[in-house]
Image: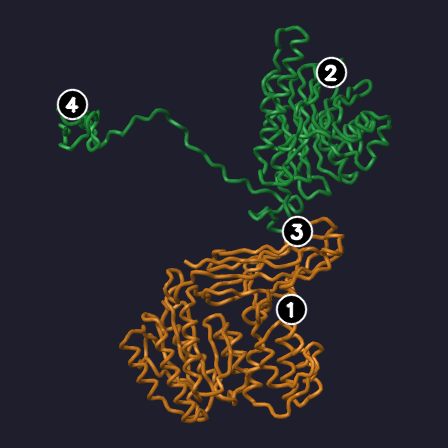
Chain colours: A green, B orange
Amino acid sequence: MTCAACGQALPDGALFCEACGAKVGSAAAPTVLTPPTTANEDESPISTPTAVRPPVVVEAPQARTCAECGGTVAADGYCEQCGAKAASERDHFREAPAPWLAGVCDRGIVHARNEDAMALYADPAVPGRSVVVVCDGVSSSKDSDVAALAGARAARDVLRAPLPQGLGVAESIEAAATKVFVTAAEAANTAVVAHTDLSSEAPASCTFVAAVAEGSLLRYAVIGDSRAYWLPDAGEGVQLTTDDSMAQLLMAGGMTRAQAEASPQAHAITKWLGKDSPDIVPVCGSLDATGPGWLLVCSDGLWNYASEPAALAGQLRAAAAGAAEESKADPGTLALALVEFAKACGGHDNISVALARVVP
Amino acid sequence: MADFSAAVYQNEFLADGGTDVQAIVSVTCTGAGTAGQSDAGGDAGEIIIIDTSGSMGVETMEGAKAAAVAALGEIVDGTFFAIISGNGAAFLAYPNVRSGPGMVRMDDRTRAEATRAIHALSAAGGTVISTWLDLAGTLFASVPEVRQRHALLLTDGENNEPAGVLDAAIARATGYYQADCRGAGTDWKVSEIRRIAQALLGTVDIIPEPAQMEAEFEAIMRTAMSRGVADAQLRVWAPQGAQVVFVRQVLPTVEDLTARRTPVNELTGAYPTGAWSDETRDYHVSVRLPAKAVGQEQLAARVQLAVGDEVKAQGLVKAKWSGDSNLTARIDAQVAHYTGQTELAAVIQEGLAAKAAGQEELATTKLGRAVQLAAETGNDEATAKLRKVVEVEDAETGTVRLKKAVEKADEMALDTASTKTTRVRK
C-alpha cells in the first residue's frame, strides 16, 4: 500500500501518511490553503487590532530628597550632597487611603531593618469603613521583612469587600464575618510562605492582626502579639485583642501585666504565620462602639512603651494636644506622633501604628 | 569594549567621635583590547627616545640600537611613531621630515626605514633631557589624530642642566603624554628619572647590562600596545564638609595622587591614571568626616573610574559609627597591608638617601625598618633587593648592618623598585 498523494510506502491499516500527512484513501493531495489576495495587499495589516491600548507611560523614578540636607538622593541610596544614607521606602512608609484612616510603619532606632508591615484600605466614597492589617516579622528568621509585607497586603485584599451579612441573623453574620477573617489569615500565611526561602533553617514568620470598622461595629482577628485597641473619646479604652504570647500565659497564670510583660520570655509568641506555623486560625472578636473614638492597631514596637489602654489613650491625647489646630483629628499626624513617642522611648523594635476614626 | 569593576575593602565602623575613613578601592579593567584600536580613544602614538650622548660608548649604544629595533617590532601596524635621538639637544632620527607631521604610521616600509635610521645613530655630546621631552611633545602635537601618546625614554647619564629647566619641561609634558623611563648602567640619577616617570604616569627601572635592553624594550612596548583604554580618570566624591586626606595608587606601584586633583565639581575631584590594559590597580583613599552620632551611617566617598565623561565603575566607601569596640578597633587587612607597603617605599628611599649622604646610623635604621616591613607584607622582591644592600640579622625586629661593599647597580635597583608593591597574601 502506498500513499496516493506522495507515493510513500504505508504499513497496513495506516489512517494517515507518515510522510505527507495525507489521509489514506483520499486520492487528492492535501489541500494547500492560499490566502486570498486583496487589492491593497501591501497596506493591509496582518490582523485587525482587537483593542486600542493607551501607550504605557513609564514614570521616571522620582528623585528622592535627602532628609538631612535637602539634597538629591543618588541611585546608590546616598545623598549626592552630604552622603547621608537615605532611609529606604521599606524603612519608613505611610499610608492614608481616606481622611479617617492612616498609619505609619517605621524601622525604629535599634533594628537594622524594618520587618514590620502594614496595609490599609478605605474607599473615600464609603465613609466609616476602614480595613487595617499589621504584621510584625520575626527578626530571628530570614526574609521576614519581605514576607510580612506580602502577608499584610494579601490579607488586606481579602478584607476589601464589605463583610458578608450571612443569612441576616446574628449568629450567621458572626460566622460569615469570622470566615472572612480566617480566609484573610490564610491568604496572609500563603503569601508569607510564598516569600520564604524553602531551604532556610529559619523560615520567614510574622504576627497578624486585622481589624475592620464598619460604622460602629469593630471586628478584629489576631495571631501573635500585635494588637488592636478601642480608644473612645469618652470613657475607658480597651485592648480588643489578646496576645498569643508567653506574657499572656503568665498573666493567665495570675501574674500582673507589668510583671508578665517584664519577664524575660514575655515577647516569645506562641502563634505565628509562616511555613513552620502549627496553627494559623486567628482568634476573632467584635465590639459595637457606642460613641466616637479611635480604633488603634499597632505592633509591639509601640505598646512596649504604653501597654495599658489608659496609657495609650494618654499618649494619643498628648499627640492631639501637640498637633496643629487643623490636624488634631488627622489620623496620619497622630499616628506619626505615636511613632515618634516610641522612638523617643528608645525605638528598640520596629513600630507600626494605624488609626481609624470611628463615628457611630 | 573595555569593562571596569571596582571593589572596596575597608572597615566602615568608626568609634564614637571617629572621623577618618580609610579604604582600598581595587579597580580592574577587562577587555581593553589594543592601543589605538578603540573608536573613542583616537590613534595611538609611540615615540622612542634614545640617549646618544658621548657617555653611551660602543657597547651600550649597540645594545640600545638593538633594543629600539626590537621595540619597533612590537609596535602594531597603523600606530603613529617616531624615533628621537637625544644628547645636548634633541634630533628627529625618524621620520626624515623637516615640516608637517613628525610621526608616520607603522607598516613594513616605515619599520624598515626606521630600523636603518636607528642603525645609523652614533654617540656624541652631552645630556639635556628637557629638550628631548619638548621635542616628543612637539611631535605628538603635529599629528592631531593621535590621542593616546606614549614615549619610551632611555638614558645613561646625569642630566646636564639646572633642575628647574627639566622640571619645567616635565610640567609641559604632564597630562599630555605618558613615558616609561629606563636607565642604562649606573651613571644616571634614580631620583631625577623617577621624577619624569612619576609625572608622566610611567615606570622607572635600571638596565644594568646592555644585553638586557632588548628584552626590556620589547616588554615595555608590548605592555604599551596592550593599553586599549587611552585615558581614564579616578574620581573621588566626598560629602560636603568632608576632606579628602589623600588618594594614592598602591598597586602595582605606590604613587601619591593627592596633589594631582583637578575639580570635576564642587565635591568631586579627578586624578589622572593614564592608559589601561587588562589589569588591576588598587587605590588607597582616606577621607575625614565630621563625626556623627553612634548608630548613624553615611557615605564617605564615591570612588569612580571614568573614561571621558562616562563613569565606568564605582565603589562606595562608607562610614558607620558604632559603640562596639570589637567592630571599630579592627583594621582592614588590605588597608594595613598597603599602609605598610607605602611606608616601605618611603623608608627604602630615605634609607638610600641617608646612606648616600654618609649618615650611616639613619640609613641603618631606615633600611632595617624596610627589611621588617618587606617581611611583614610579604614583598619578596623588596626583601631580595634589600639583602644585596644590607646584612639582615633579624628581619622580624628589623636588625640590619650596612654591607661594606655594595654594587652600585644593586643599590639603584633597590631604589627604582622601592615603589613596587605586592598584593595581600591570601
- Residue kind at label 3, given as amino acid type: Gln
Nearer to me, B189 or B128: B189
Q: Secondary structure at mark 4?
A: loop
**Residue B86, position in %: x, y?**
42, 86
For label 1, count other residues whose C-alpha is less than 10 Å away and answer few (under 14), some (14-19) or many (20+). Answer: some
* Label 1 close to label 4 by CB (< 8 Å): no
- Residue kind at label 1, given as amino acid type: Thr
Chain of the residue where label 4 is placed in the rendered structure? A
- Tell me if residue A38 can be seen: no
- Tell me if residue A64 can be seen: yes
Chain of the residue where label 1 is placed in the rendered structure? B
Tag 1 residue: B339
Q: CA distance from mark 1 to mark 4?
A: 91 Å
Residue B382 falls in image quadrant: bottom right
Q: CA distance from mark 4 to mark 2?
A: 79 Å
Q: Secondary structure at mark 2?
A: strand
The residue located at (59%, 22%) in the rendering is: A158
Q: Secondary structure at mark 3?
A: strand
Same chain letter for marks 4 and 3: no
The residue located at (44%, 84%) in the rendering is: B212
Q: What label does residue A25 carry, if any?
A: 4
Please identify the quadrant where the C terminus of chain B is shown. Answer: bottom right
Tag 2 residue: A287
Tag 3 residue: B298
Foreground mark, 4 or 2, reads 4
Counting the numbered discs, the total is 4
- Residue kind at label 4, given as amino acid type: Gly
